[in-house]
Amino acid sequence: MLYKWAKLTLVAGILLNGLCPPALANTTIVESASPDPSGNTIPLASIALLLPLRSGPLGAAADAVRAGFLNAYERDKSDLAVTVIESADTPADMLATYAAASKKYDILIGPLSRTGITAIVQNGQVTKPTIALTQPDLSADKDQALPAQLLPIGLSIEAEARQVASWVGAELAPGKVFVLSTSAAWQKRVASAFTQQLQGSGLRADLMTFSMADGVLNPGALTQLQQRIQNEKPRLLFAALNADQTRQIRNAVGAETPIYGISQLNPMALGDINPEHQIPELDGVRLLDIPWQVQPDHPAVMVYPRRTDGAEQQPNADLDRLYALGIDAFRIAREVAARNSVFQIDGVTGRLNVSFGVGINAPSFERAEPEAVYQNGVVTPLYAH
C-alpha cells in the first residue's frame, strides 16, 4: 500500500465497517515527511495505536500513553506510519476494533485494559505483532500460553514486587519479613507476588493485613505491629501499601526497621518541589520506580519532553508513568518494525530485555527498574545511572 505523507490530521468518522454505534472509532493519522519528491512511499511498517481515548475510566490514561507515543514518534519517525485508533473499551468492542485493525496494519499497539487484551487472547485473534500495554488476565486458564505474536509490556506492580523480593533476598537474608497490606485487591496481588518470589531466598514472609476506616489504619493493629517488631526483630517490612499508609506505619513503628516497597510509595512527579507534597516521614524508605520518575539525568529521560497538565490540574505521577510507557512502546515497536527479535533498550521505564518473533518461541519481556530511596521527603536514585 502506498502512503501519502502529510502533517498530523484528525479524521472524524467511521473507521470500521459493520460495527454497532458504540464501537465506531475515530482515527488520528500521524505521518512523517517523506524524502520522496513524489510524496508517495512505502513505509517500513504501518502501526496502529489502539486506545480508549473517550473512555471515562481510562480516557486520561489513554491520552497520556498517546502523548508519550507520539512524542517519541516525532523524535524518531524511522519511516514508520502511525495511526491512532479510538475505540470503546468494552471487551466486545475492543475485540472487533483489534480484528479490523489486524487486517490493515503491520504492528498493533494496545489495548490498554486487561479486559480488552484478555478478550483478544481468549478469542485467538493475535495474528499480527501486538505490543500490549497491559497483561492479560489468564488466571482462569493457567495453562494457556501467550500467543507468539503478543508482547505484553505494561507497567506491572506485581513485577515490581518480584524485583523487590529479589533485591532484599540478595541483601538481607536470612531472617523474617513482615509483609504489610490492606484488603485492597491490588495490594493483595503485590503482597502475593512478593511472597512467592521470596521463596528460597532465606527470608520468611509473614503477612499482616490491616483494616482501615476513613483512610486511617487500625490503631490496634499498628500497636500489635510495633510489639511484634520489638519481639521478633524482622529484617525488614515490605509495604504493599500506598505512600500515606506507609507514612502511618513509619510514624507508628519508627525508622529502625527498614521499609521497602514499590512505585506506589512515590506519589510525586519528577521535579515537584512543592513542600506540601514532600513526605519527610518516609526518609530512608527504599523502593523501585521508573527512570522517568527518579532519574532526570538518565540519557533517555533527558531527550523527551515532559508531560504537561492543564493549569488547573495537579501533577499526576501515575499519568506520568503511563506517558513514559507510551515512549517505550514506540521504541519497542521501532525495533520490531526493523525485524530485531532479541534486543535491549535502556528505556524511560527501565532496562528492557525483549525477545519477540523468534520462531514459535513464546515472547519474553523483562523490565528492571532502578532502586530509589526517600531523602528529604522526595524520592531519589539509590545509585547513579
Image (spheres, grey):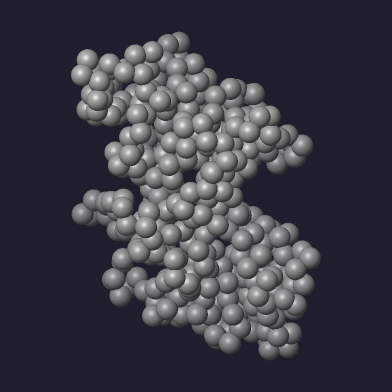
Q: How many marks?
A: 0
Q: Where is residue 216 in the image (x, y as percent from the top left)?
A: 52, 71
Position of 360 with respect to 273 (left or right) is: right
Residue at point 72% right, 65% down? 198
Give the x, y percent position of residue 128.
Answer: 54, 24
Residue 177 or 302: which is nearer the viewer? 302
User: Of 249 and 9, which appears nearest the observer?
Assistant: 9
Residue drawn at point x = 47 percent, y = 77 percent: 282
Q: Is residue 366 visible?
A: yes
- x, y percent for residue 43: 37, 23
Q: Is residue 299 above or below residue 16?
A: below
Q: Is residue 183 visible?
A: no
- The answer to whether 38 is drawn above or below residue 122 in the figure is above
Give me the residue at 75% from left, 39% from top. Answer: 142
Expressed as whole percent of the image width and height from the top left, the position of residue 75 reads: 30, 42
Quarter of the image for the C terminus: give it: bottom left
Vertical placement of residue 291 versus 109, above or below: below
The foreground one among 158 and 164 is: 164
Above-or-below relation of 62 to 232: above
Please name whichever residue, 131 or 225, is drawn nearer the observer in this view of the structure. 131
Question: Which of the image's four quarters has the N terminus?
Answer: top left
Occupied quadrant, residue 124 = top right
- Residue drawn at x 73%, y 34% as measured from the top left: 144
Q: Work out which residue is located at the far top of the displayed protein and give it.
A: 18
